[in-house]
Each structure stands twice: as structure tokens, then as C-alpha cells.
């Protein structure tokens, strides 16, 4: 059985040379945690990271990559407003879920692994090398981090355990037809209703994994122009949420890129009112940019490896 970790000396070298002694003690509270899965020393923590990455590398090579061509050939589709992924992609996703890899950086108390972002990014690279479409489900874990950082405790208990098991999937719903790179121009609106909850109205486009179970929606809550009038809300797929279209793309066909409409969709505020863009969303986008870069490296690694094999055998 091959492995996208052991066969990649550059990736292993980056992991081996990471400044773990500066990162892991802070992440692990100086190894004082009493959780049964928490490491008790720096050496044990590094060993844990290595074991997880070896597992991801083996899964990506032996299970995920062989299904990628079928995933891309069949692609995601829209059936009665619901996104349906290819069965081959669902099998690969279940594999990641069963291995406990969907809460990579989330705290162990919610079922996560509490691993550093450096290790998570290495895992994203290997999953992307196997199947770039699957990466868009695996690498949206920054949404869970955003809920953990900005959400109320009841949102933590309601959503984080299910994100860690893969029972639910997230997405971020930011872009609009006239507000792509200029997010300060977002026109989707959220208003407090009589019951003290928020309702969201508007439309989003080019939403990766737009058929997700929970959506982090950037909406205007204040009568202020620009980014300071925006807030980030957590909206469940269901009442008032409709996926109306999937985009036709040149590649990565297994990933659903959707138009999502909101019609009085109920939502919960993340962070403070008016902090949605410059605090909540920018923090989320910093993570997403890192993982998209890792996806590009993984795709390039796959291309280089296949090209070398072809050149040696033709």
C-alpha cells in the first residue's frame, strides 16, 4: 500500500522541521490536560501528529485517489433543491469521518483532535493530491473554528460535536453577484424578529459546498454602508434556505459551487453585531486561503508524480 506521506520527502521534511517546541506546549496547556487522548509530553505530541499524518497519507493514496476519476466524471448534481455528491466521493468522505479526521483542530471535549494548523494543512495537501473535490468538504473545518471562536456556548454544544463526526458539513456564504472581492458591498440583510432571533434575506453565489447543513452567512445587520454594517450569522439548511443552481465548471466537478437564496431564514449571530467582516470573516478567510494554497500544492504534487511515472515508462 502506498502513502502520500511516506513517498513525499519534501512534505515530511517540512513537518519534521516545524517549530513544535514553540507551538505544542501552548496548544496542549503545557501537557497538563487530563483528557485520555491528550499527549503528556512534547515527544508524545509530535509522535501523535506523525501517526495521524501517516494515516491520512495511506488513506489518500489507497482509498481516495483511486476514486477521484469517477468523482470528477460523475460530478455533483442538484436534485429538488438538494445537492447530491457522487457515491465514490461519499465513500471517501465517510472514510475521513470514521477515522475521526473532521475535527482536526477543534478541542477534544467536542470530539476533535486539538492538532495544530500546520498538521491540518499537511493533511489537506495529501487529501487534495488524492481528490481535489473531496478537499472542499474536508478543508472547510475553519468554519468549525469560527463557530468555536465567536459562537455562544449553546452553539458550541449544538454544532461542534456533529462537525467533528462529519454528521453535518459547513460552508461559508459570502459572495454575491455584486459583492465578490468587495465584500463590503454585501446586500443580503438580517433583521431581528419579534422572537429575538435573526432572519436572513438575500442571495449568495459561487458558494463552495453550498448545499451544506450549516452556512456561515455574511449579512447586513446595521444601517451603515460598507463593512462595518455587516455581521456573520450561522444559518441551518432548511426553512428559508434554497439551493437554486450549481455552476458548470472546467474541473473539480465533485465539488458543488452553488447559488443559495435566503427567504426569512432563521439564524444565530456569531460574534458581535458589525464585527462580521473585519473580525469574524477575515479570521475565517485567513484559514481558508492557507488550505486553498495547500490544495494547489497537492494538485501540483499529483501532476508531478504522474508526469514522472509517464516519462519513465513511455
Image (spheres, rainbow, N blue to C red):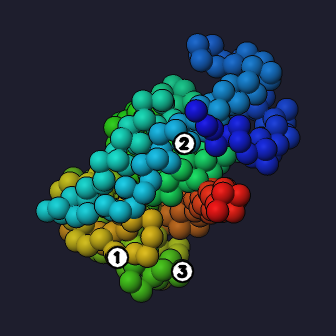
Q: Secondary structure at mark 2?
A: helix
Tell me if residue 59 comes above or below residue 187 in the rendering: above
Q: Residue at x 65, y 32 (%)?
A: 54
Label 3 vs label 1, nearer the camera: 1
Q: Residue at x 58, y 53 (%)?
A: 129
Quarter holding the N terminus is top right
Furthest residue toward left:
80
Q: Which is nearer the N-term, disc 2 or disc 3?
A: 2
Q: Is residue 98 visible?
A: yes
Q: Is residue 104 visible?
A: no
Q: Secondary structure at mark 3?
A: loop
Left or right, 82 with reference to 9:
left
- The residue singled out by tag 1 in the image is 248
The span from disc 3 to disc 1 (Cα, nearest Å) is 21 Å
From the viewer's side, name the closer residue of 123 and 222.
123
Identify the mark at residue 181; answer none if there is no mark.
3
Q: Which is nearer the N-term, disc 2 or disc 1?
A: 2
Q: Position of residue 160 (x, y in %)?
A: 43, 37
From the viewer's side, name the closer residue of 206 and 283.
206
Left or right, 71 with reference to 24:
left
Identify the mark at residue 60; answer none if there is no mark.
2
Q: Residue at x 45, y 70 (%)?
A: 251
Q: Residue at x 43, y 76 (%)?
A: 250
Q: Secondary structure at mark 1?
A: loop
The span from disc 2 to disc 3 (Cα, nearest Å) is 33 Å
Amino acid at each position: 500500500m502506498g502513502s502520500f506521506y511516506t513517498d513525499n520527502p519534501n512534505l515530511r521534511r517540512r513537518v519534521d522541521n516545524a517549530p513544535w517546541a514553540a507551538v505544542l506546549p501552548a496548544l496542549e496547556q503545557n501537557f497538563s490536560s487530563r483528557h485520555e487522548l491528550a499527549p503528556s509530553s512534547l515527544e508524545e505530541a509530535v509522535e501523535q501528529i506523525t501517526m495521524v499524518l501517516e494515516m491520512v497519507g495511506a488513506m489518500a493514496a489507497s482509498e481516495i485517489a483511486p476514486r477521484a476519476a469517477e468523482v470528477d466524471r460523475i460530478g455533483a448534481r442538484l436534485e429538488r433543491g438538494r445537492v447530491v455528491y457522487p457515491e465514490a466521493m461519499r465513500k471517501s468522505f465517510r472514510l475521513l469521518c470514521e477515522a475521526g479526521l473532521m475535527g482536526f483542530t477543534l478541542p477534544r471535549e467536542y470530539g476533535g483532535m486539538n492538532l495544530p494548523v500546520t498538521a491540518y494543512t499537511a493533511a489537506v495537501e495529501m487529501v487534495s493530491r488524492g481528490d481535489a473535490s473531496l478537499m472542499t468538504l474536508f478543508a472547510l473545518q475553519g468554519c468549525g473554528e469560527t463557530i468555536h471562536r465567536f459562537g455562544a456556548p449553546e452553539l458550541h454544544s449544538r454544532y461542534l460535536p456533529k462537525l467533528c463526526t462529519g454528521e453535518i458539513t459547513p460552508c461559508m456564504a459570502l459572495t454575491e453577484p455584486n459583492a465578490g472581492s468587495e465584500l463590503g458591498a454585501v446586500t443580503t440583510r438580517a433583521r431581528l424578529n419579534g422572537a429575538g432571533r435573526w432572519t436572513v434575506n438575500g442571495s449568495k453565489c459561487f458558494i463552495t459546498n453550498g448545499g451544506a447543513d450549516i452556512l456561515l452567512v455574511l449579512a447586513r445587520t446595521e444601517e451603515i454602508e460598507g463593512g462595518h454594517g455587516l455581521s456573520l450569522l450561522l444559518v441551518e439548511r432548511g426553512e428559508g434556505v434554497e439551493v437554486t443552481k450549481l455552476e458548470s465548471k472546467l474541473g473539480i466537478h465533485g465539488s458543488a459551487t452553488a447559488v443559495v437564496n435566503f427567504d426569512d431564514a432563521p439564524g444565530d449571530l456569531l460574534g458581535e453585531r458589525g464585527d462580521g467582516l473585519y473580525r469574524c470573516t477575515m479570521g475565517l478567510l485567513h484559514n481558508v486561503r492557507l488550505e486553498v494554497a495547500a490544495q494547489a500544492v497537492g494538485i501540483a504534487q499529483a501532476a508531478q508524480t504522474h508526469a514522472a511515472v509517464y516519462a519513465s515508462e513511455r
